[in-house]
Each structure stands twice: as structure tokens, then as C-alpha cells.
Amino acid sequence: MTAWTPADMPDLTGRSAIVTGANSGIGLPTALELARRGARVTVTARSADKGAGAVARIRQEVPDARVDHARLDLADLASVREFAAGVDQVDLLVNNAGVGMTPKSVTKDGFELQFGTNHLGHFALTGLLLPRLLARPGARVVTVSSDAHARGSIDFDDLALDHGYGRMSAYGRSKLANLLFALELQRRVQRARADLVSVATHPGATATHIVKLGPLQWLLGVFLQSPEAGAVPSLYAATSPDIRGGEFVGPRAKLLTPSPTARSTEVAARLWDVSAELTGVRFEEIAYR
């Protein structure tokens, strides 16, 4: 069987996509290929200049691309709310942006940075956009996780990581939270019989700026796959007619098995409740009654 590639994507004319953190890394080729297939794409970035730069690069490849940019800082819930309030239509939401292996610090709202940005920011964004997503037939939410989720754990009594912080373990925790969220979202939309598909992805080891090596950054391109290859799972999850809600898509569009903790409905439900309390976003449209 021939491996799936972005050339296999269906026509997306009439569909609207949002890709968070699409100014670089795997987000940029994700946005590019969605635009190439006719989707109206919104590139989000923390910097308006970087967002505009990404739009310019996409239009170099696809001159007639329907693409724009908007500022979105997932480490600031006020920014998340402001962005969501300006969205009129969305069919595909790709929760792609992230930070990784950072020194211990906090978001504007006081949450540990990696957990707050990678998980809570996307949790809030998805919930705020849920009414628009549910208004569109066949809407999808793609959340980028990682195989690092298998090395993560969540201590609900120490979400601030005051009793021990490791850059890699904090990253793994945030990616575990991403996967727990994606799977729990699918359970809830199924229970509500809502027309929405939630899928998680693992891009594989990719040469992006989430890992910073200073003057040795070029080494990543030697040993790791390209951002274009890293974008394949997200593009497959966002567009393939073969995808099913709750799947975990890995490199070369192969399905993966989440860790036992990621499959725990009890941990997922507790994380959902805690996340709703911390962000104030309740997902009322699919809330358990």
C-alpha cells in the first residue's frame, strides 16, 4: 500500500481552518497544504509580524491562497478569548502551537508554562470555538501531542510543579494532557451525538524550534525529519475520509496506541473538570447531563 501524502488530500474549497502556531515548525506546512487544497486558513502566532511573514511565505507557494493571520497567545487566556470572539466560521481546528523544555516559568494567568500553553490554552480555545465548530457539518479538531506523553504523569495536587520541575517531564505532562483532552473530547461529542471528530497526532522527531540549540540549531536538520514530514499526521487527521474520532495518528499517517494513562477515562474526566475550573470554559454544548 502506498503511503499517504498531502497529495491525497481532498478538495477543501468552502472549508475554513485555523492552525495555531502556524508561523513556523510543522504548523507552517500544515497551513500551507490546507491552503493549497482550497481551504480558507487562519494562521495564528504570538507576533503579528511573524503571522504576516507566514502568510507571505504561503502566498509565495500558493499565490491565490485564501489565508490570513491573527495574533493568539495561548499563554494568555485573555488573548484566547479575544481571538475566539473574532472567529465567524471554522471547520478544522488544528491545535498545533506549543512550547517545550522551557525553564520553569508561568503563563500570564499563573499556570506552569508548558501545561498552561500546550494544554490549557488549547482547551480554552477549543471550548470557546465549539459553537462555531458544531455549526459546520463534519468539523474536526486535531490536537498535536507527542510520544513524549508516555513519559508524562499528572499530579493533580501539584499542577504548579512546586515539588519538582524537570523540563522534559513537564513537557511530557503537557503532551499527556493534550492526548487525554483529545480522547475525552471525542467521548463527549459521541455522548452528545454531536457532529464533530476529535483526533490526536504525534508528528515524530522533527527539526523545529521547539528544541533550541543556539548556534548548533542546524544539527536538528541533519538528524531529524523535516517540518513537512512532521506535518503529515496533522494533515491526514484533518482531512482524510478514513479517519475516525479518538484515533492517534503518528508519522507516515500510521495509527498509534496511546499509553495506558492516556486511555484512562478517570484521569481524563478529572483533567477535564480541573481544566474547566482553571480556564472558566465549560463546553456547555456537550456537557454531561
Image: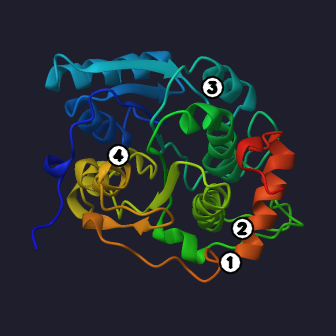
* Viewer-nearest residue: 32 or 53: 32
Q: Residue at x 70, y 26 (%)?
A: 81
Judge from the rendering whether residue 52 lies leftward or rightward of residue 81; answer left or right. left
- The disc, 2 or 3, on the residue closer to the chain's N-terminal end is 3
Disc 1 to disc 2: CB gap under 8 Å:
yes
Q: Which residue has dot 1 on it?
A: 264
Distance between mark 4 and mark 2 Cα atoms: 26 Å
Q: Which residue has dot 4 on it?
A: 26
**Between marks 4 and 2 in the image, the one whose residue lies nearer the viewer:** 2
Residue 21 vs 45, above or below: the answer is below
Residue 270 vs 266, above or below: the answer is above
Question: Does the image show residue 31?
Answer: yes
Q: Which residue has dot 2 on it?
A: 268
Mark 3, secondary structure of its residue: helix
Q: Amino acid at mark 1?
A: Ser
Q: Which residue has dot 3 on it?
A: 84
Q: Amino acid at mark 4?
A: Ile
Judge from the rendering whether residue 168 lies leftward or rightward of residue 112; answer left or right. left
